């Protein structure tokens, strides 16, 4: 059964219109830039409201409490089948001050060495044109949906 995730595409209009994308932590994404950046998102727990999951995930991945109203952006399906319900919120965030939860992973595989990695190793404000080049392909429709909010 495909997983369901929820997340928030943060945006700001000043000093110039931009969206906040995150780079996933861990060795799989370490050397990838183009096509790797995403919205902060994560798994929706059983019996958890989608909006609550999105808010929780942003707090876990960025260390930020979203106080702005959430605007639904709909759902996209990632290549592995995971559905991602997304929201937009206008809120500025200091990307230098993000703090992310960590996860454990055996790396290299079957090596017996377990290390901690941050869920998010970077966050960056990007104009929509730059975000289109950097964003995970399956999440690109979210940029089309948020553009009217940036005007």
Image: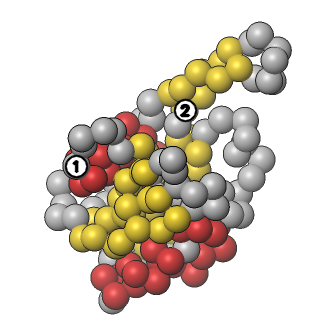
Query: What residue sits 74% from the left and 53% below the top?
Result: 32
Residue 36: percent from left, percent from top: 65, 57
Q: Residue at x 46, y 83 (%)?
A: 144
Whether residue 59 can be seen here: no
Q: From the viewer's perspective, is residue 21 above or below residue 44?
A: below
Q: Residue at x 60, y 28 (%)?
A: 117
Q: Secondary structure at mark 1?
A: loop
Which residue lies at the image location 27% right of the left edge and 53% below the top edge?
A: 50
Q: Which residue is mark 2?
A: 118
The residue identified by callout 1 is 49
Q: Secondary structure at mark 2?
A: strand
Looking at the image, is mark 1 or mark 2 earlier in the sequence? Answer: 1
Residue 103: % across, % down = 54, 26
Pick the quarter of the image with the C terminus. bottom left
Q: Is residue 120 visible?
A: yes
Residue nearer the viewer, 18 or 47: 47
- Residue 63 is situated, as x and y percent measured from the top left of the image, at 35, 39
Residue 62 located left or right of residue 46: right
Q: Is residue 65 left or right of residue 127?
A: left
Crowd around label 2: few <14 · some 14–19 · many ≥20 (10 Å): some
Give the alpha-carbon distance from disc 1 to disc 2, as whole Å: 25 Å
Q: Quadrant of residue 65?
A: top left
Q: Is the residue 79 above or below the residue 98 in the image? A: below
Q: For the residue carrying disc 1, how many other residues have a C-alpha within 10 Å: few (<14), some (14-19), or many (20+)? A: few
Viewer-side label of 1, 2: 1
User: Quadrant location of residue 17?
Assistant: bottom left
Q: Which mark, residue 79?
A: none
Residue contact at pointers 1 and 2, CB within 8 angstroms:
no
Determine the image quadrant of residue 121.
Answer: top right
Q: Position of residue 31 (x, y in %)?
A: 77, 47
């Amino acid at each position: 059964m495909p997983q369901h995730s929820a997340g928030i595409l943060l945006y700001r209009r000043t000093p110039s219109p931009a969206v906040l994308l995150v780079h996933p932590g861990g060795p799989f994404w370490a050397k990838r830039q183009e096509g790797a950046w995403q919205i902060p998102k994560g798994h929706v727990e059983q019996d958890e409201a989608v909006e609550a999951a999105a808010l929780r995930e942003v707090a876990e991945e960025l260390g930020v409490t979203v106080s702005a109203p959430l605007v639904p952006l709909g759902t996209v399906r990632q290549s592995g089948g995971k559905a991602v319900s997304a929201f937009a919120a206008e809120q500025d965030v200091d990307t230098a001050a993000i703090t992310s939860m960590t996860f454990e992973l055996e790396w290299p595989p079957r090596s017996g060495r377990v290390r901690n990695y941050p869920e998010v190793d970077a966050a960056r404000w990007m104009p929509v044109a730059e975000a289109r080049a950097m964003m995970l392909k399956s999440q690109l429709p979210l940029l089309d949906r948020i553009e009217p909010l940036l005007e």
